[in-house]
Image (spheres, rainbow, N blue to C red):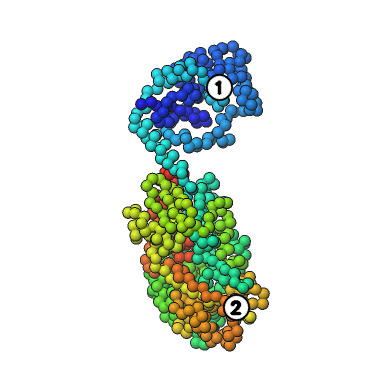
Amino acid sequence: MSFRFDVKPGLNLLYLRGAGTVTGRQVLRSLRVLRGRAGLSPGDRHALRPGGRRDGRAGRRCGHGRRRGDGAGSARASGLPPRRRGAKLRPPNALPNGNRDARPDCAGAPLLPAPEGPFLAGAWEERPAPTGSEKRRARAIVSSSFPPPPASLVDVAAASSSSSSSTDDADADVLVIGAGLAGLACARELTRRSGDLRVRLLEASDRVGGRVRTVAHDGFLLDRGFQVLLTAYPLAQQMLDYDALALRRFYNGALVRHDGGFHRVADPLRHPRDLPATLLSPVGTLADKLRVGYLRWALQEGSLRELFARPETTTAEALRERWGFSDAMIHRFFRPFLGGIFLESGELRTSSRMFEFVFRMFSEGAAALPEAGMEAMPRQLADALPGGTLRREARVEAVEDPSGPLQTVHLERGDPLRAPTVVVATEAPEARRLLENDGADAKSDRLPSTAHRSTATVYFAAGRPPTDEAILMLDGDAGAGPANTVTVPSNVQPSYAPPGKSLVSASVLGAPEQSDEELQEAVRGQLRGWFGAGVEGWRALRTVRVDYALPEQAPPYLSPPARAVRLRPGRYCCGDHRRTASINGALAGGRAAAETVMADRRAGRVPSA
């Protein structure tokens, strides 16, 4: 078996390159490094120097324009600037700090340590091609000095070279499917952590954001369902620029519609002047109001890790048994307040861990709206991506199981894309469709559940707002009408409505069966009882229905609090269905996927394109 030894300039190490033939140039490069250890006499070393001759006299030219004792001779011959006295000669591919580039064709384990000595400076110079006699003598020296390598070592090197070259046809290092918050967070973290990583983010529609969307309609900004940003979300604080979003906040409390009137429930620490009205409201007992203060304090104690370590039950059970609230307080306040967040009516069956996390976020921060609508958040993340990362209108039909190191992503339109790593960052039903044939390593219980919750939002344009406050209004009388939560977004952010107009939002839980017109009239009739005959003059703008608004969150939804994002090395799945069903959960899932991808690449569990 023929073999070749090769020393790459800049590494000073001997590497096995696999099967091949010994060429004169490669041998001579090796000998420049190894000649001090190959048993050659000083005369033999000079005889092997291309274009040179044996001559020990100082100052005499010995080929390639170099004088003995003249450290700048080689620089002049190669056209490089002369080396300063005392300056260390550095190979062209060496970094200033002494670390050298990891070139892809230098993979392998060193067989011999690098020789030392001043003669290594000549190894970086460009030299003429060797003559035929020099090649023959070099081959003879190498053959006698180094035995053939073991066959197993040659096979390993050849296999490594084959595996590396098999990823040359990749279109990217990582393909991320879905440009919602999770996909954007994943792509952002991947490109931020590794500037040379080729990341492609594929979005099926013509805009980013997934479920976090905003549309302009007759001068109004209509979010895709009633949504708010909780400013205390840890991942939102890390990834979003709040100042650039120009956030404005809701009032820390609510007006509860009960028994024909509105009753205020406020955060007494932020609105102390509203404490008497809160204590005297018939929404709950005086003990219930004190328990709200205790709940606020208790949930801010300790870390989030400790919060998620509490036993998981339903929200209703936790409110009754763990925190001691009365049925009246649960029914009149917590049911409409938390029901509007978790999109559930009736019994609060959402995980108690989710409830306690969200209530802590309300206690530590505030609910807010960006000036340009909720879609400003994903747009901000997308704008931070390097050019060419995001590809819109690229709907994925299937993710093909790899037969080699590359996976194939088939698009509805256009050529398929190939990459060693694929991250599915879509909502749960689409993720399950793409991953349901993922094989034995991706069992069905590891794939996201398609169970979900729905909502509809009816938007009205009003000449005058029903209230001047930036506050939530809750239906404390279950069954009084379809609307659970009513608010005036333009009181929070004036940009949500044109001058002289107000935007009124009414949220309906579930998937109502009525047509848009029927639902609008039912909501109008309910709000007429709240605000009077002026509601008849409101103009219905649009009814926004969101079928998959949130994943189902009943226990054991958060046991464990964070589900694995790695289905197998090279295949990942992230989204709010892998964490808390929230903006924070989507961002956290995307970042976790990026961190796992980078860890697998560093560990060599997935090939590099």
> In front: 358, or 38?
38
- Residue for badge 1: 128
Above or below, 322 relative to 381: below
- Residue for badge 2: 461
> In front: 191, or 213?
213
Which amino acid lies under the numbered mark 2 shown in the image of this protein?
Ala
Q: Which quadrant holds the N terminus?
A: top left
Residue 512 seen anywhere in this rendered image of the structure: yes
The label on residue 535 is none
User: Which residue is painted at 56% across and 73% down in the image?
Assistant: 252
In the picture as drawn, the residue positioned furthest to the left comes out as 440
User: Which residue is painted at 51% across and 29% down in the image?
Assistant: 9
Q: Distance of mark 2 from mark 1, alpha carbons? A: 82 Å
Q: How many marks?
A: 2
Mark 2 element type: strand
Quarter residue 558 falls in: bottom left
Above or below, 518 relative to 378: below
Residue 348 location (% of width, % of height): 41, 74
User: Which residue is painted at 37% across and 68% down in the image?
Assistant: 555
> In front: 517, or 555?
517
Residue 235 seen anywhere in this rendered image of the structure: no
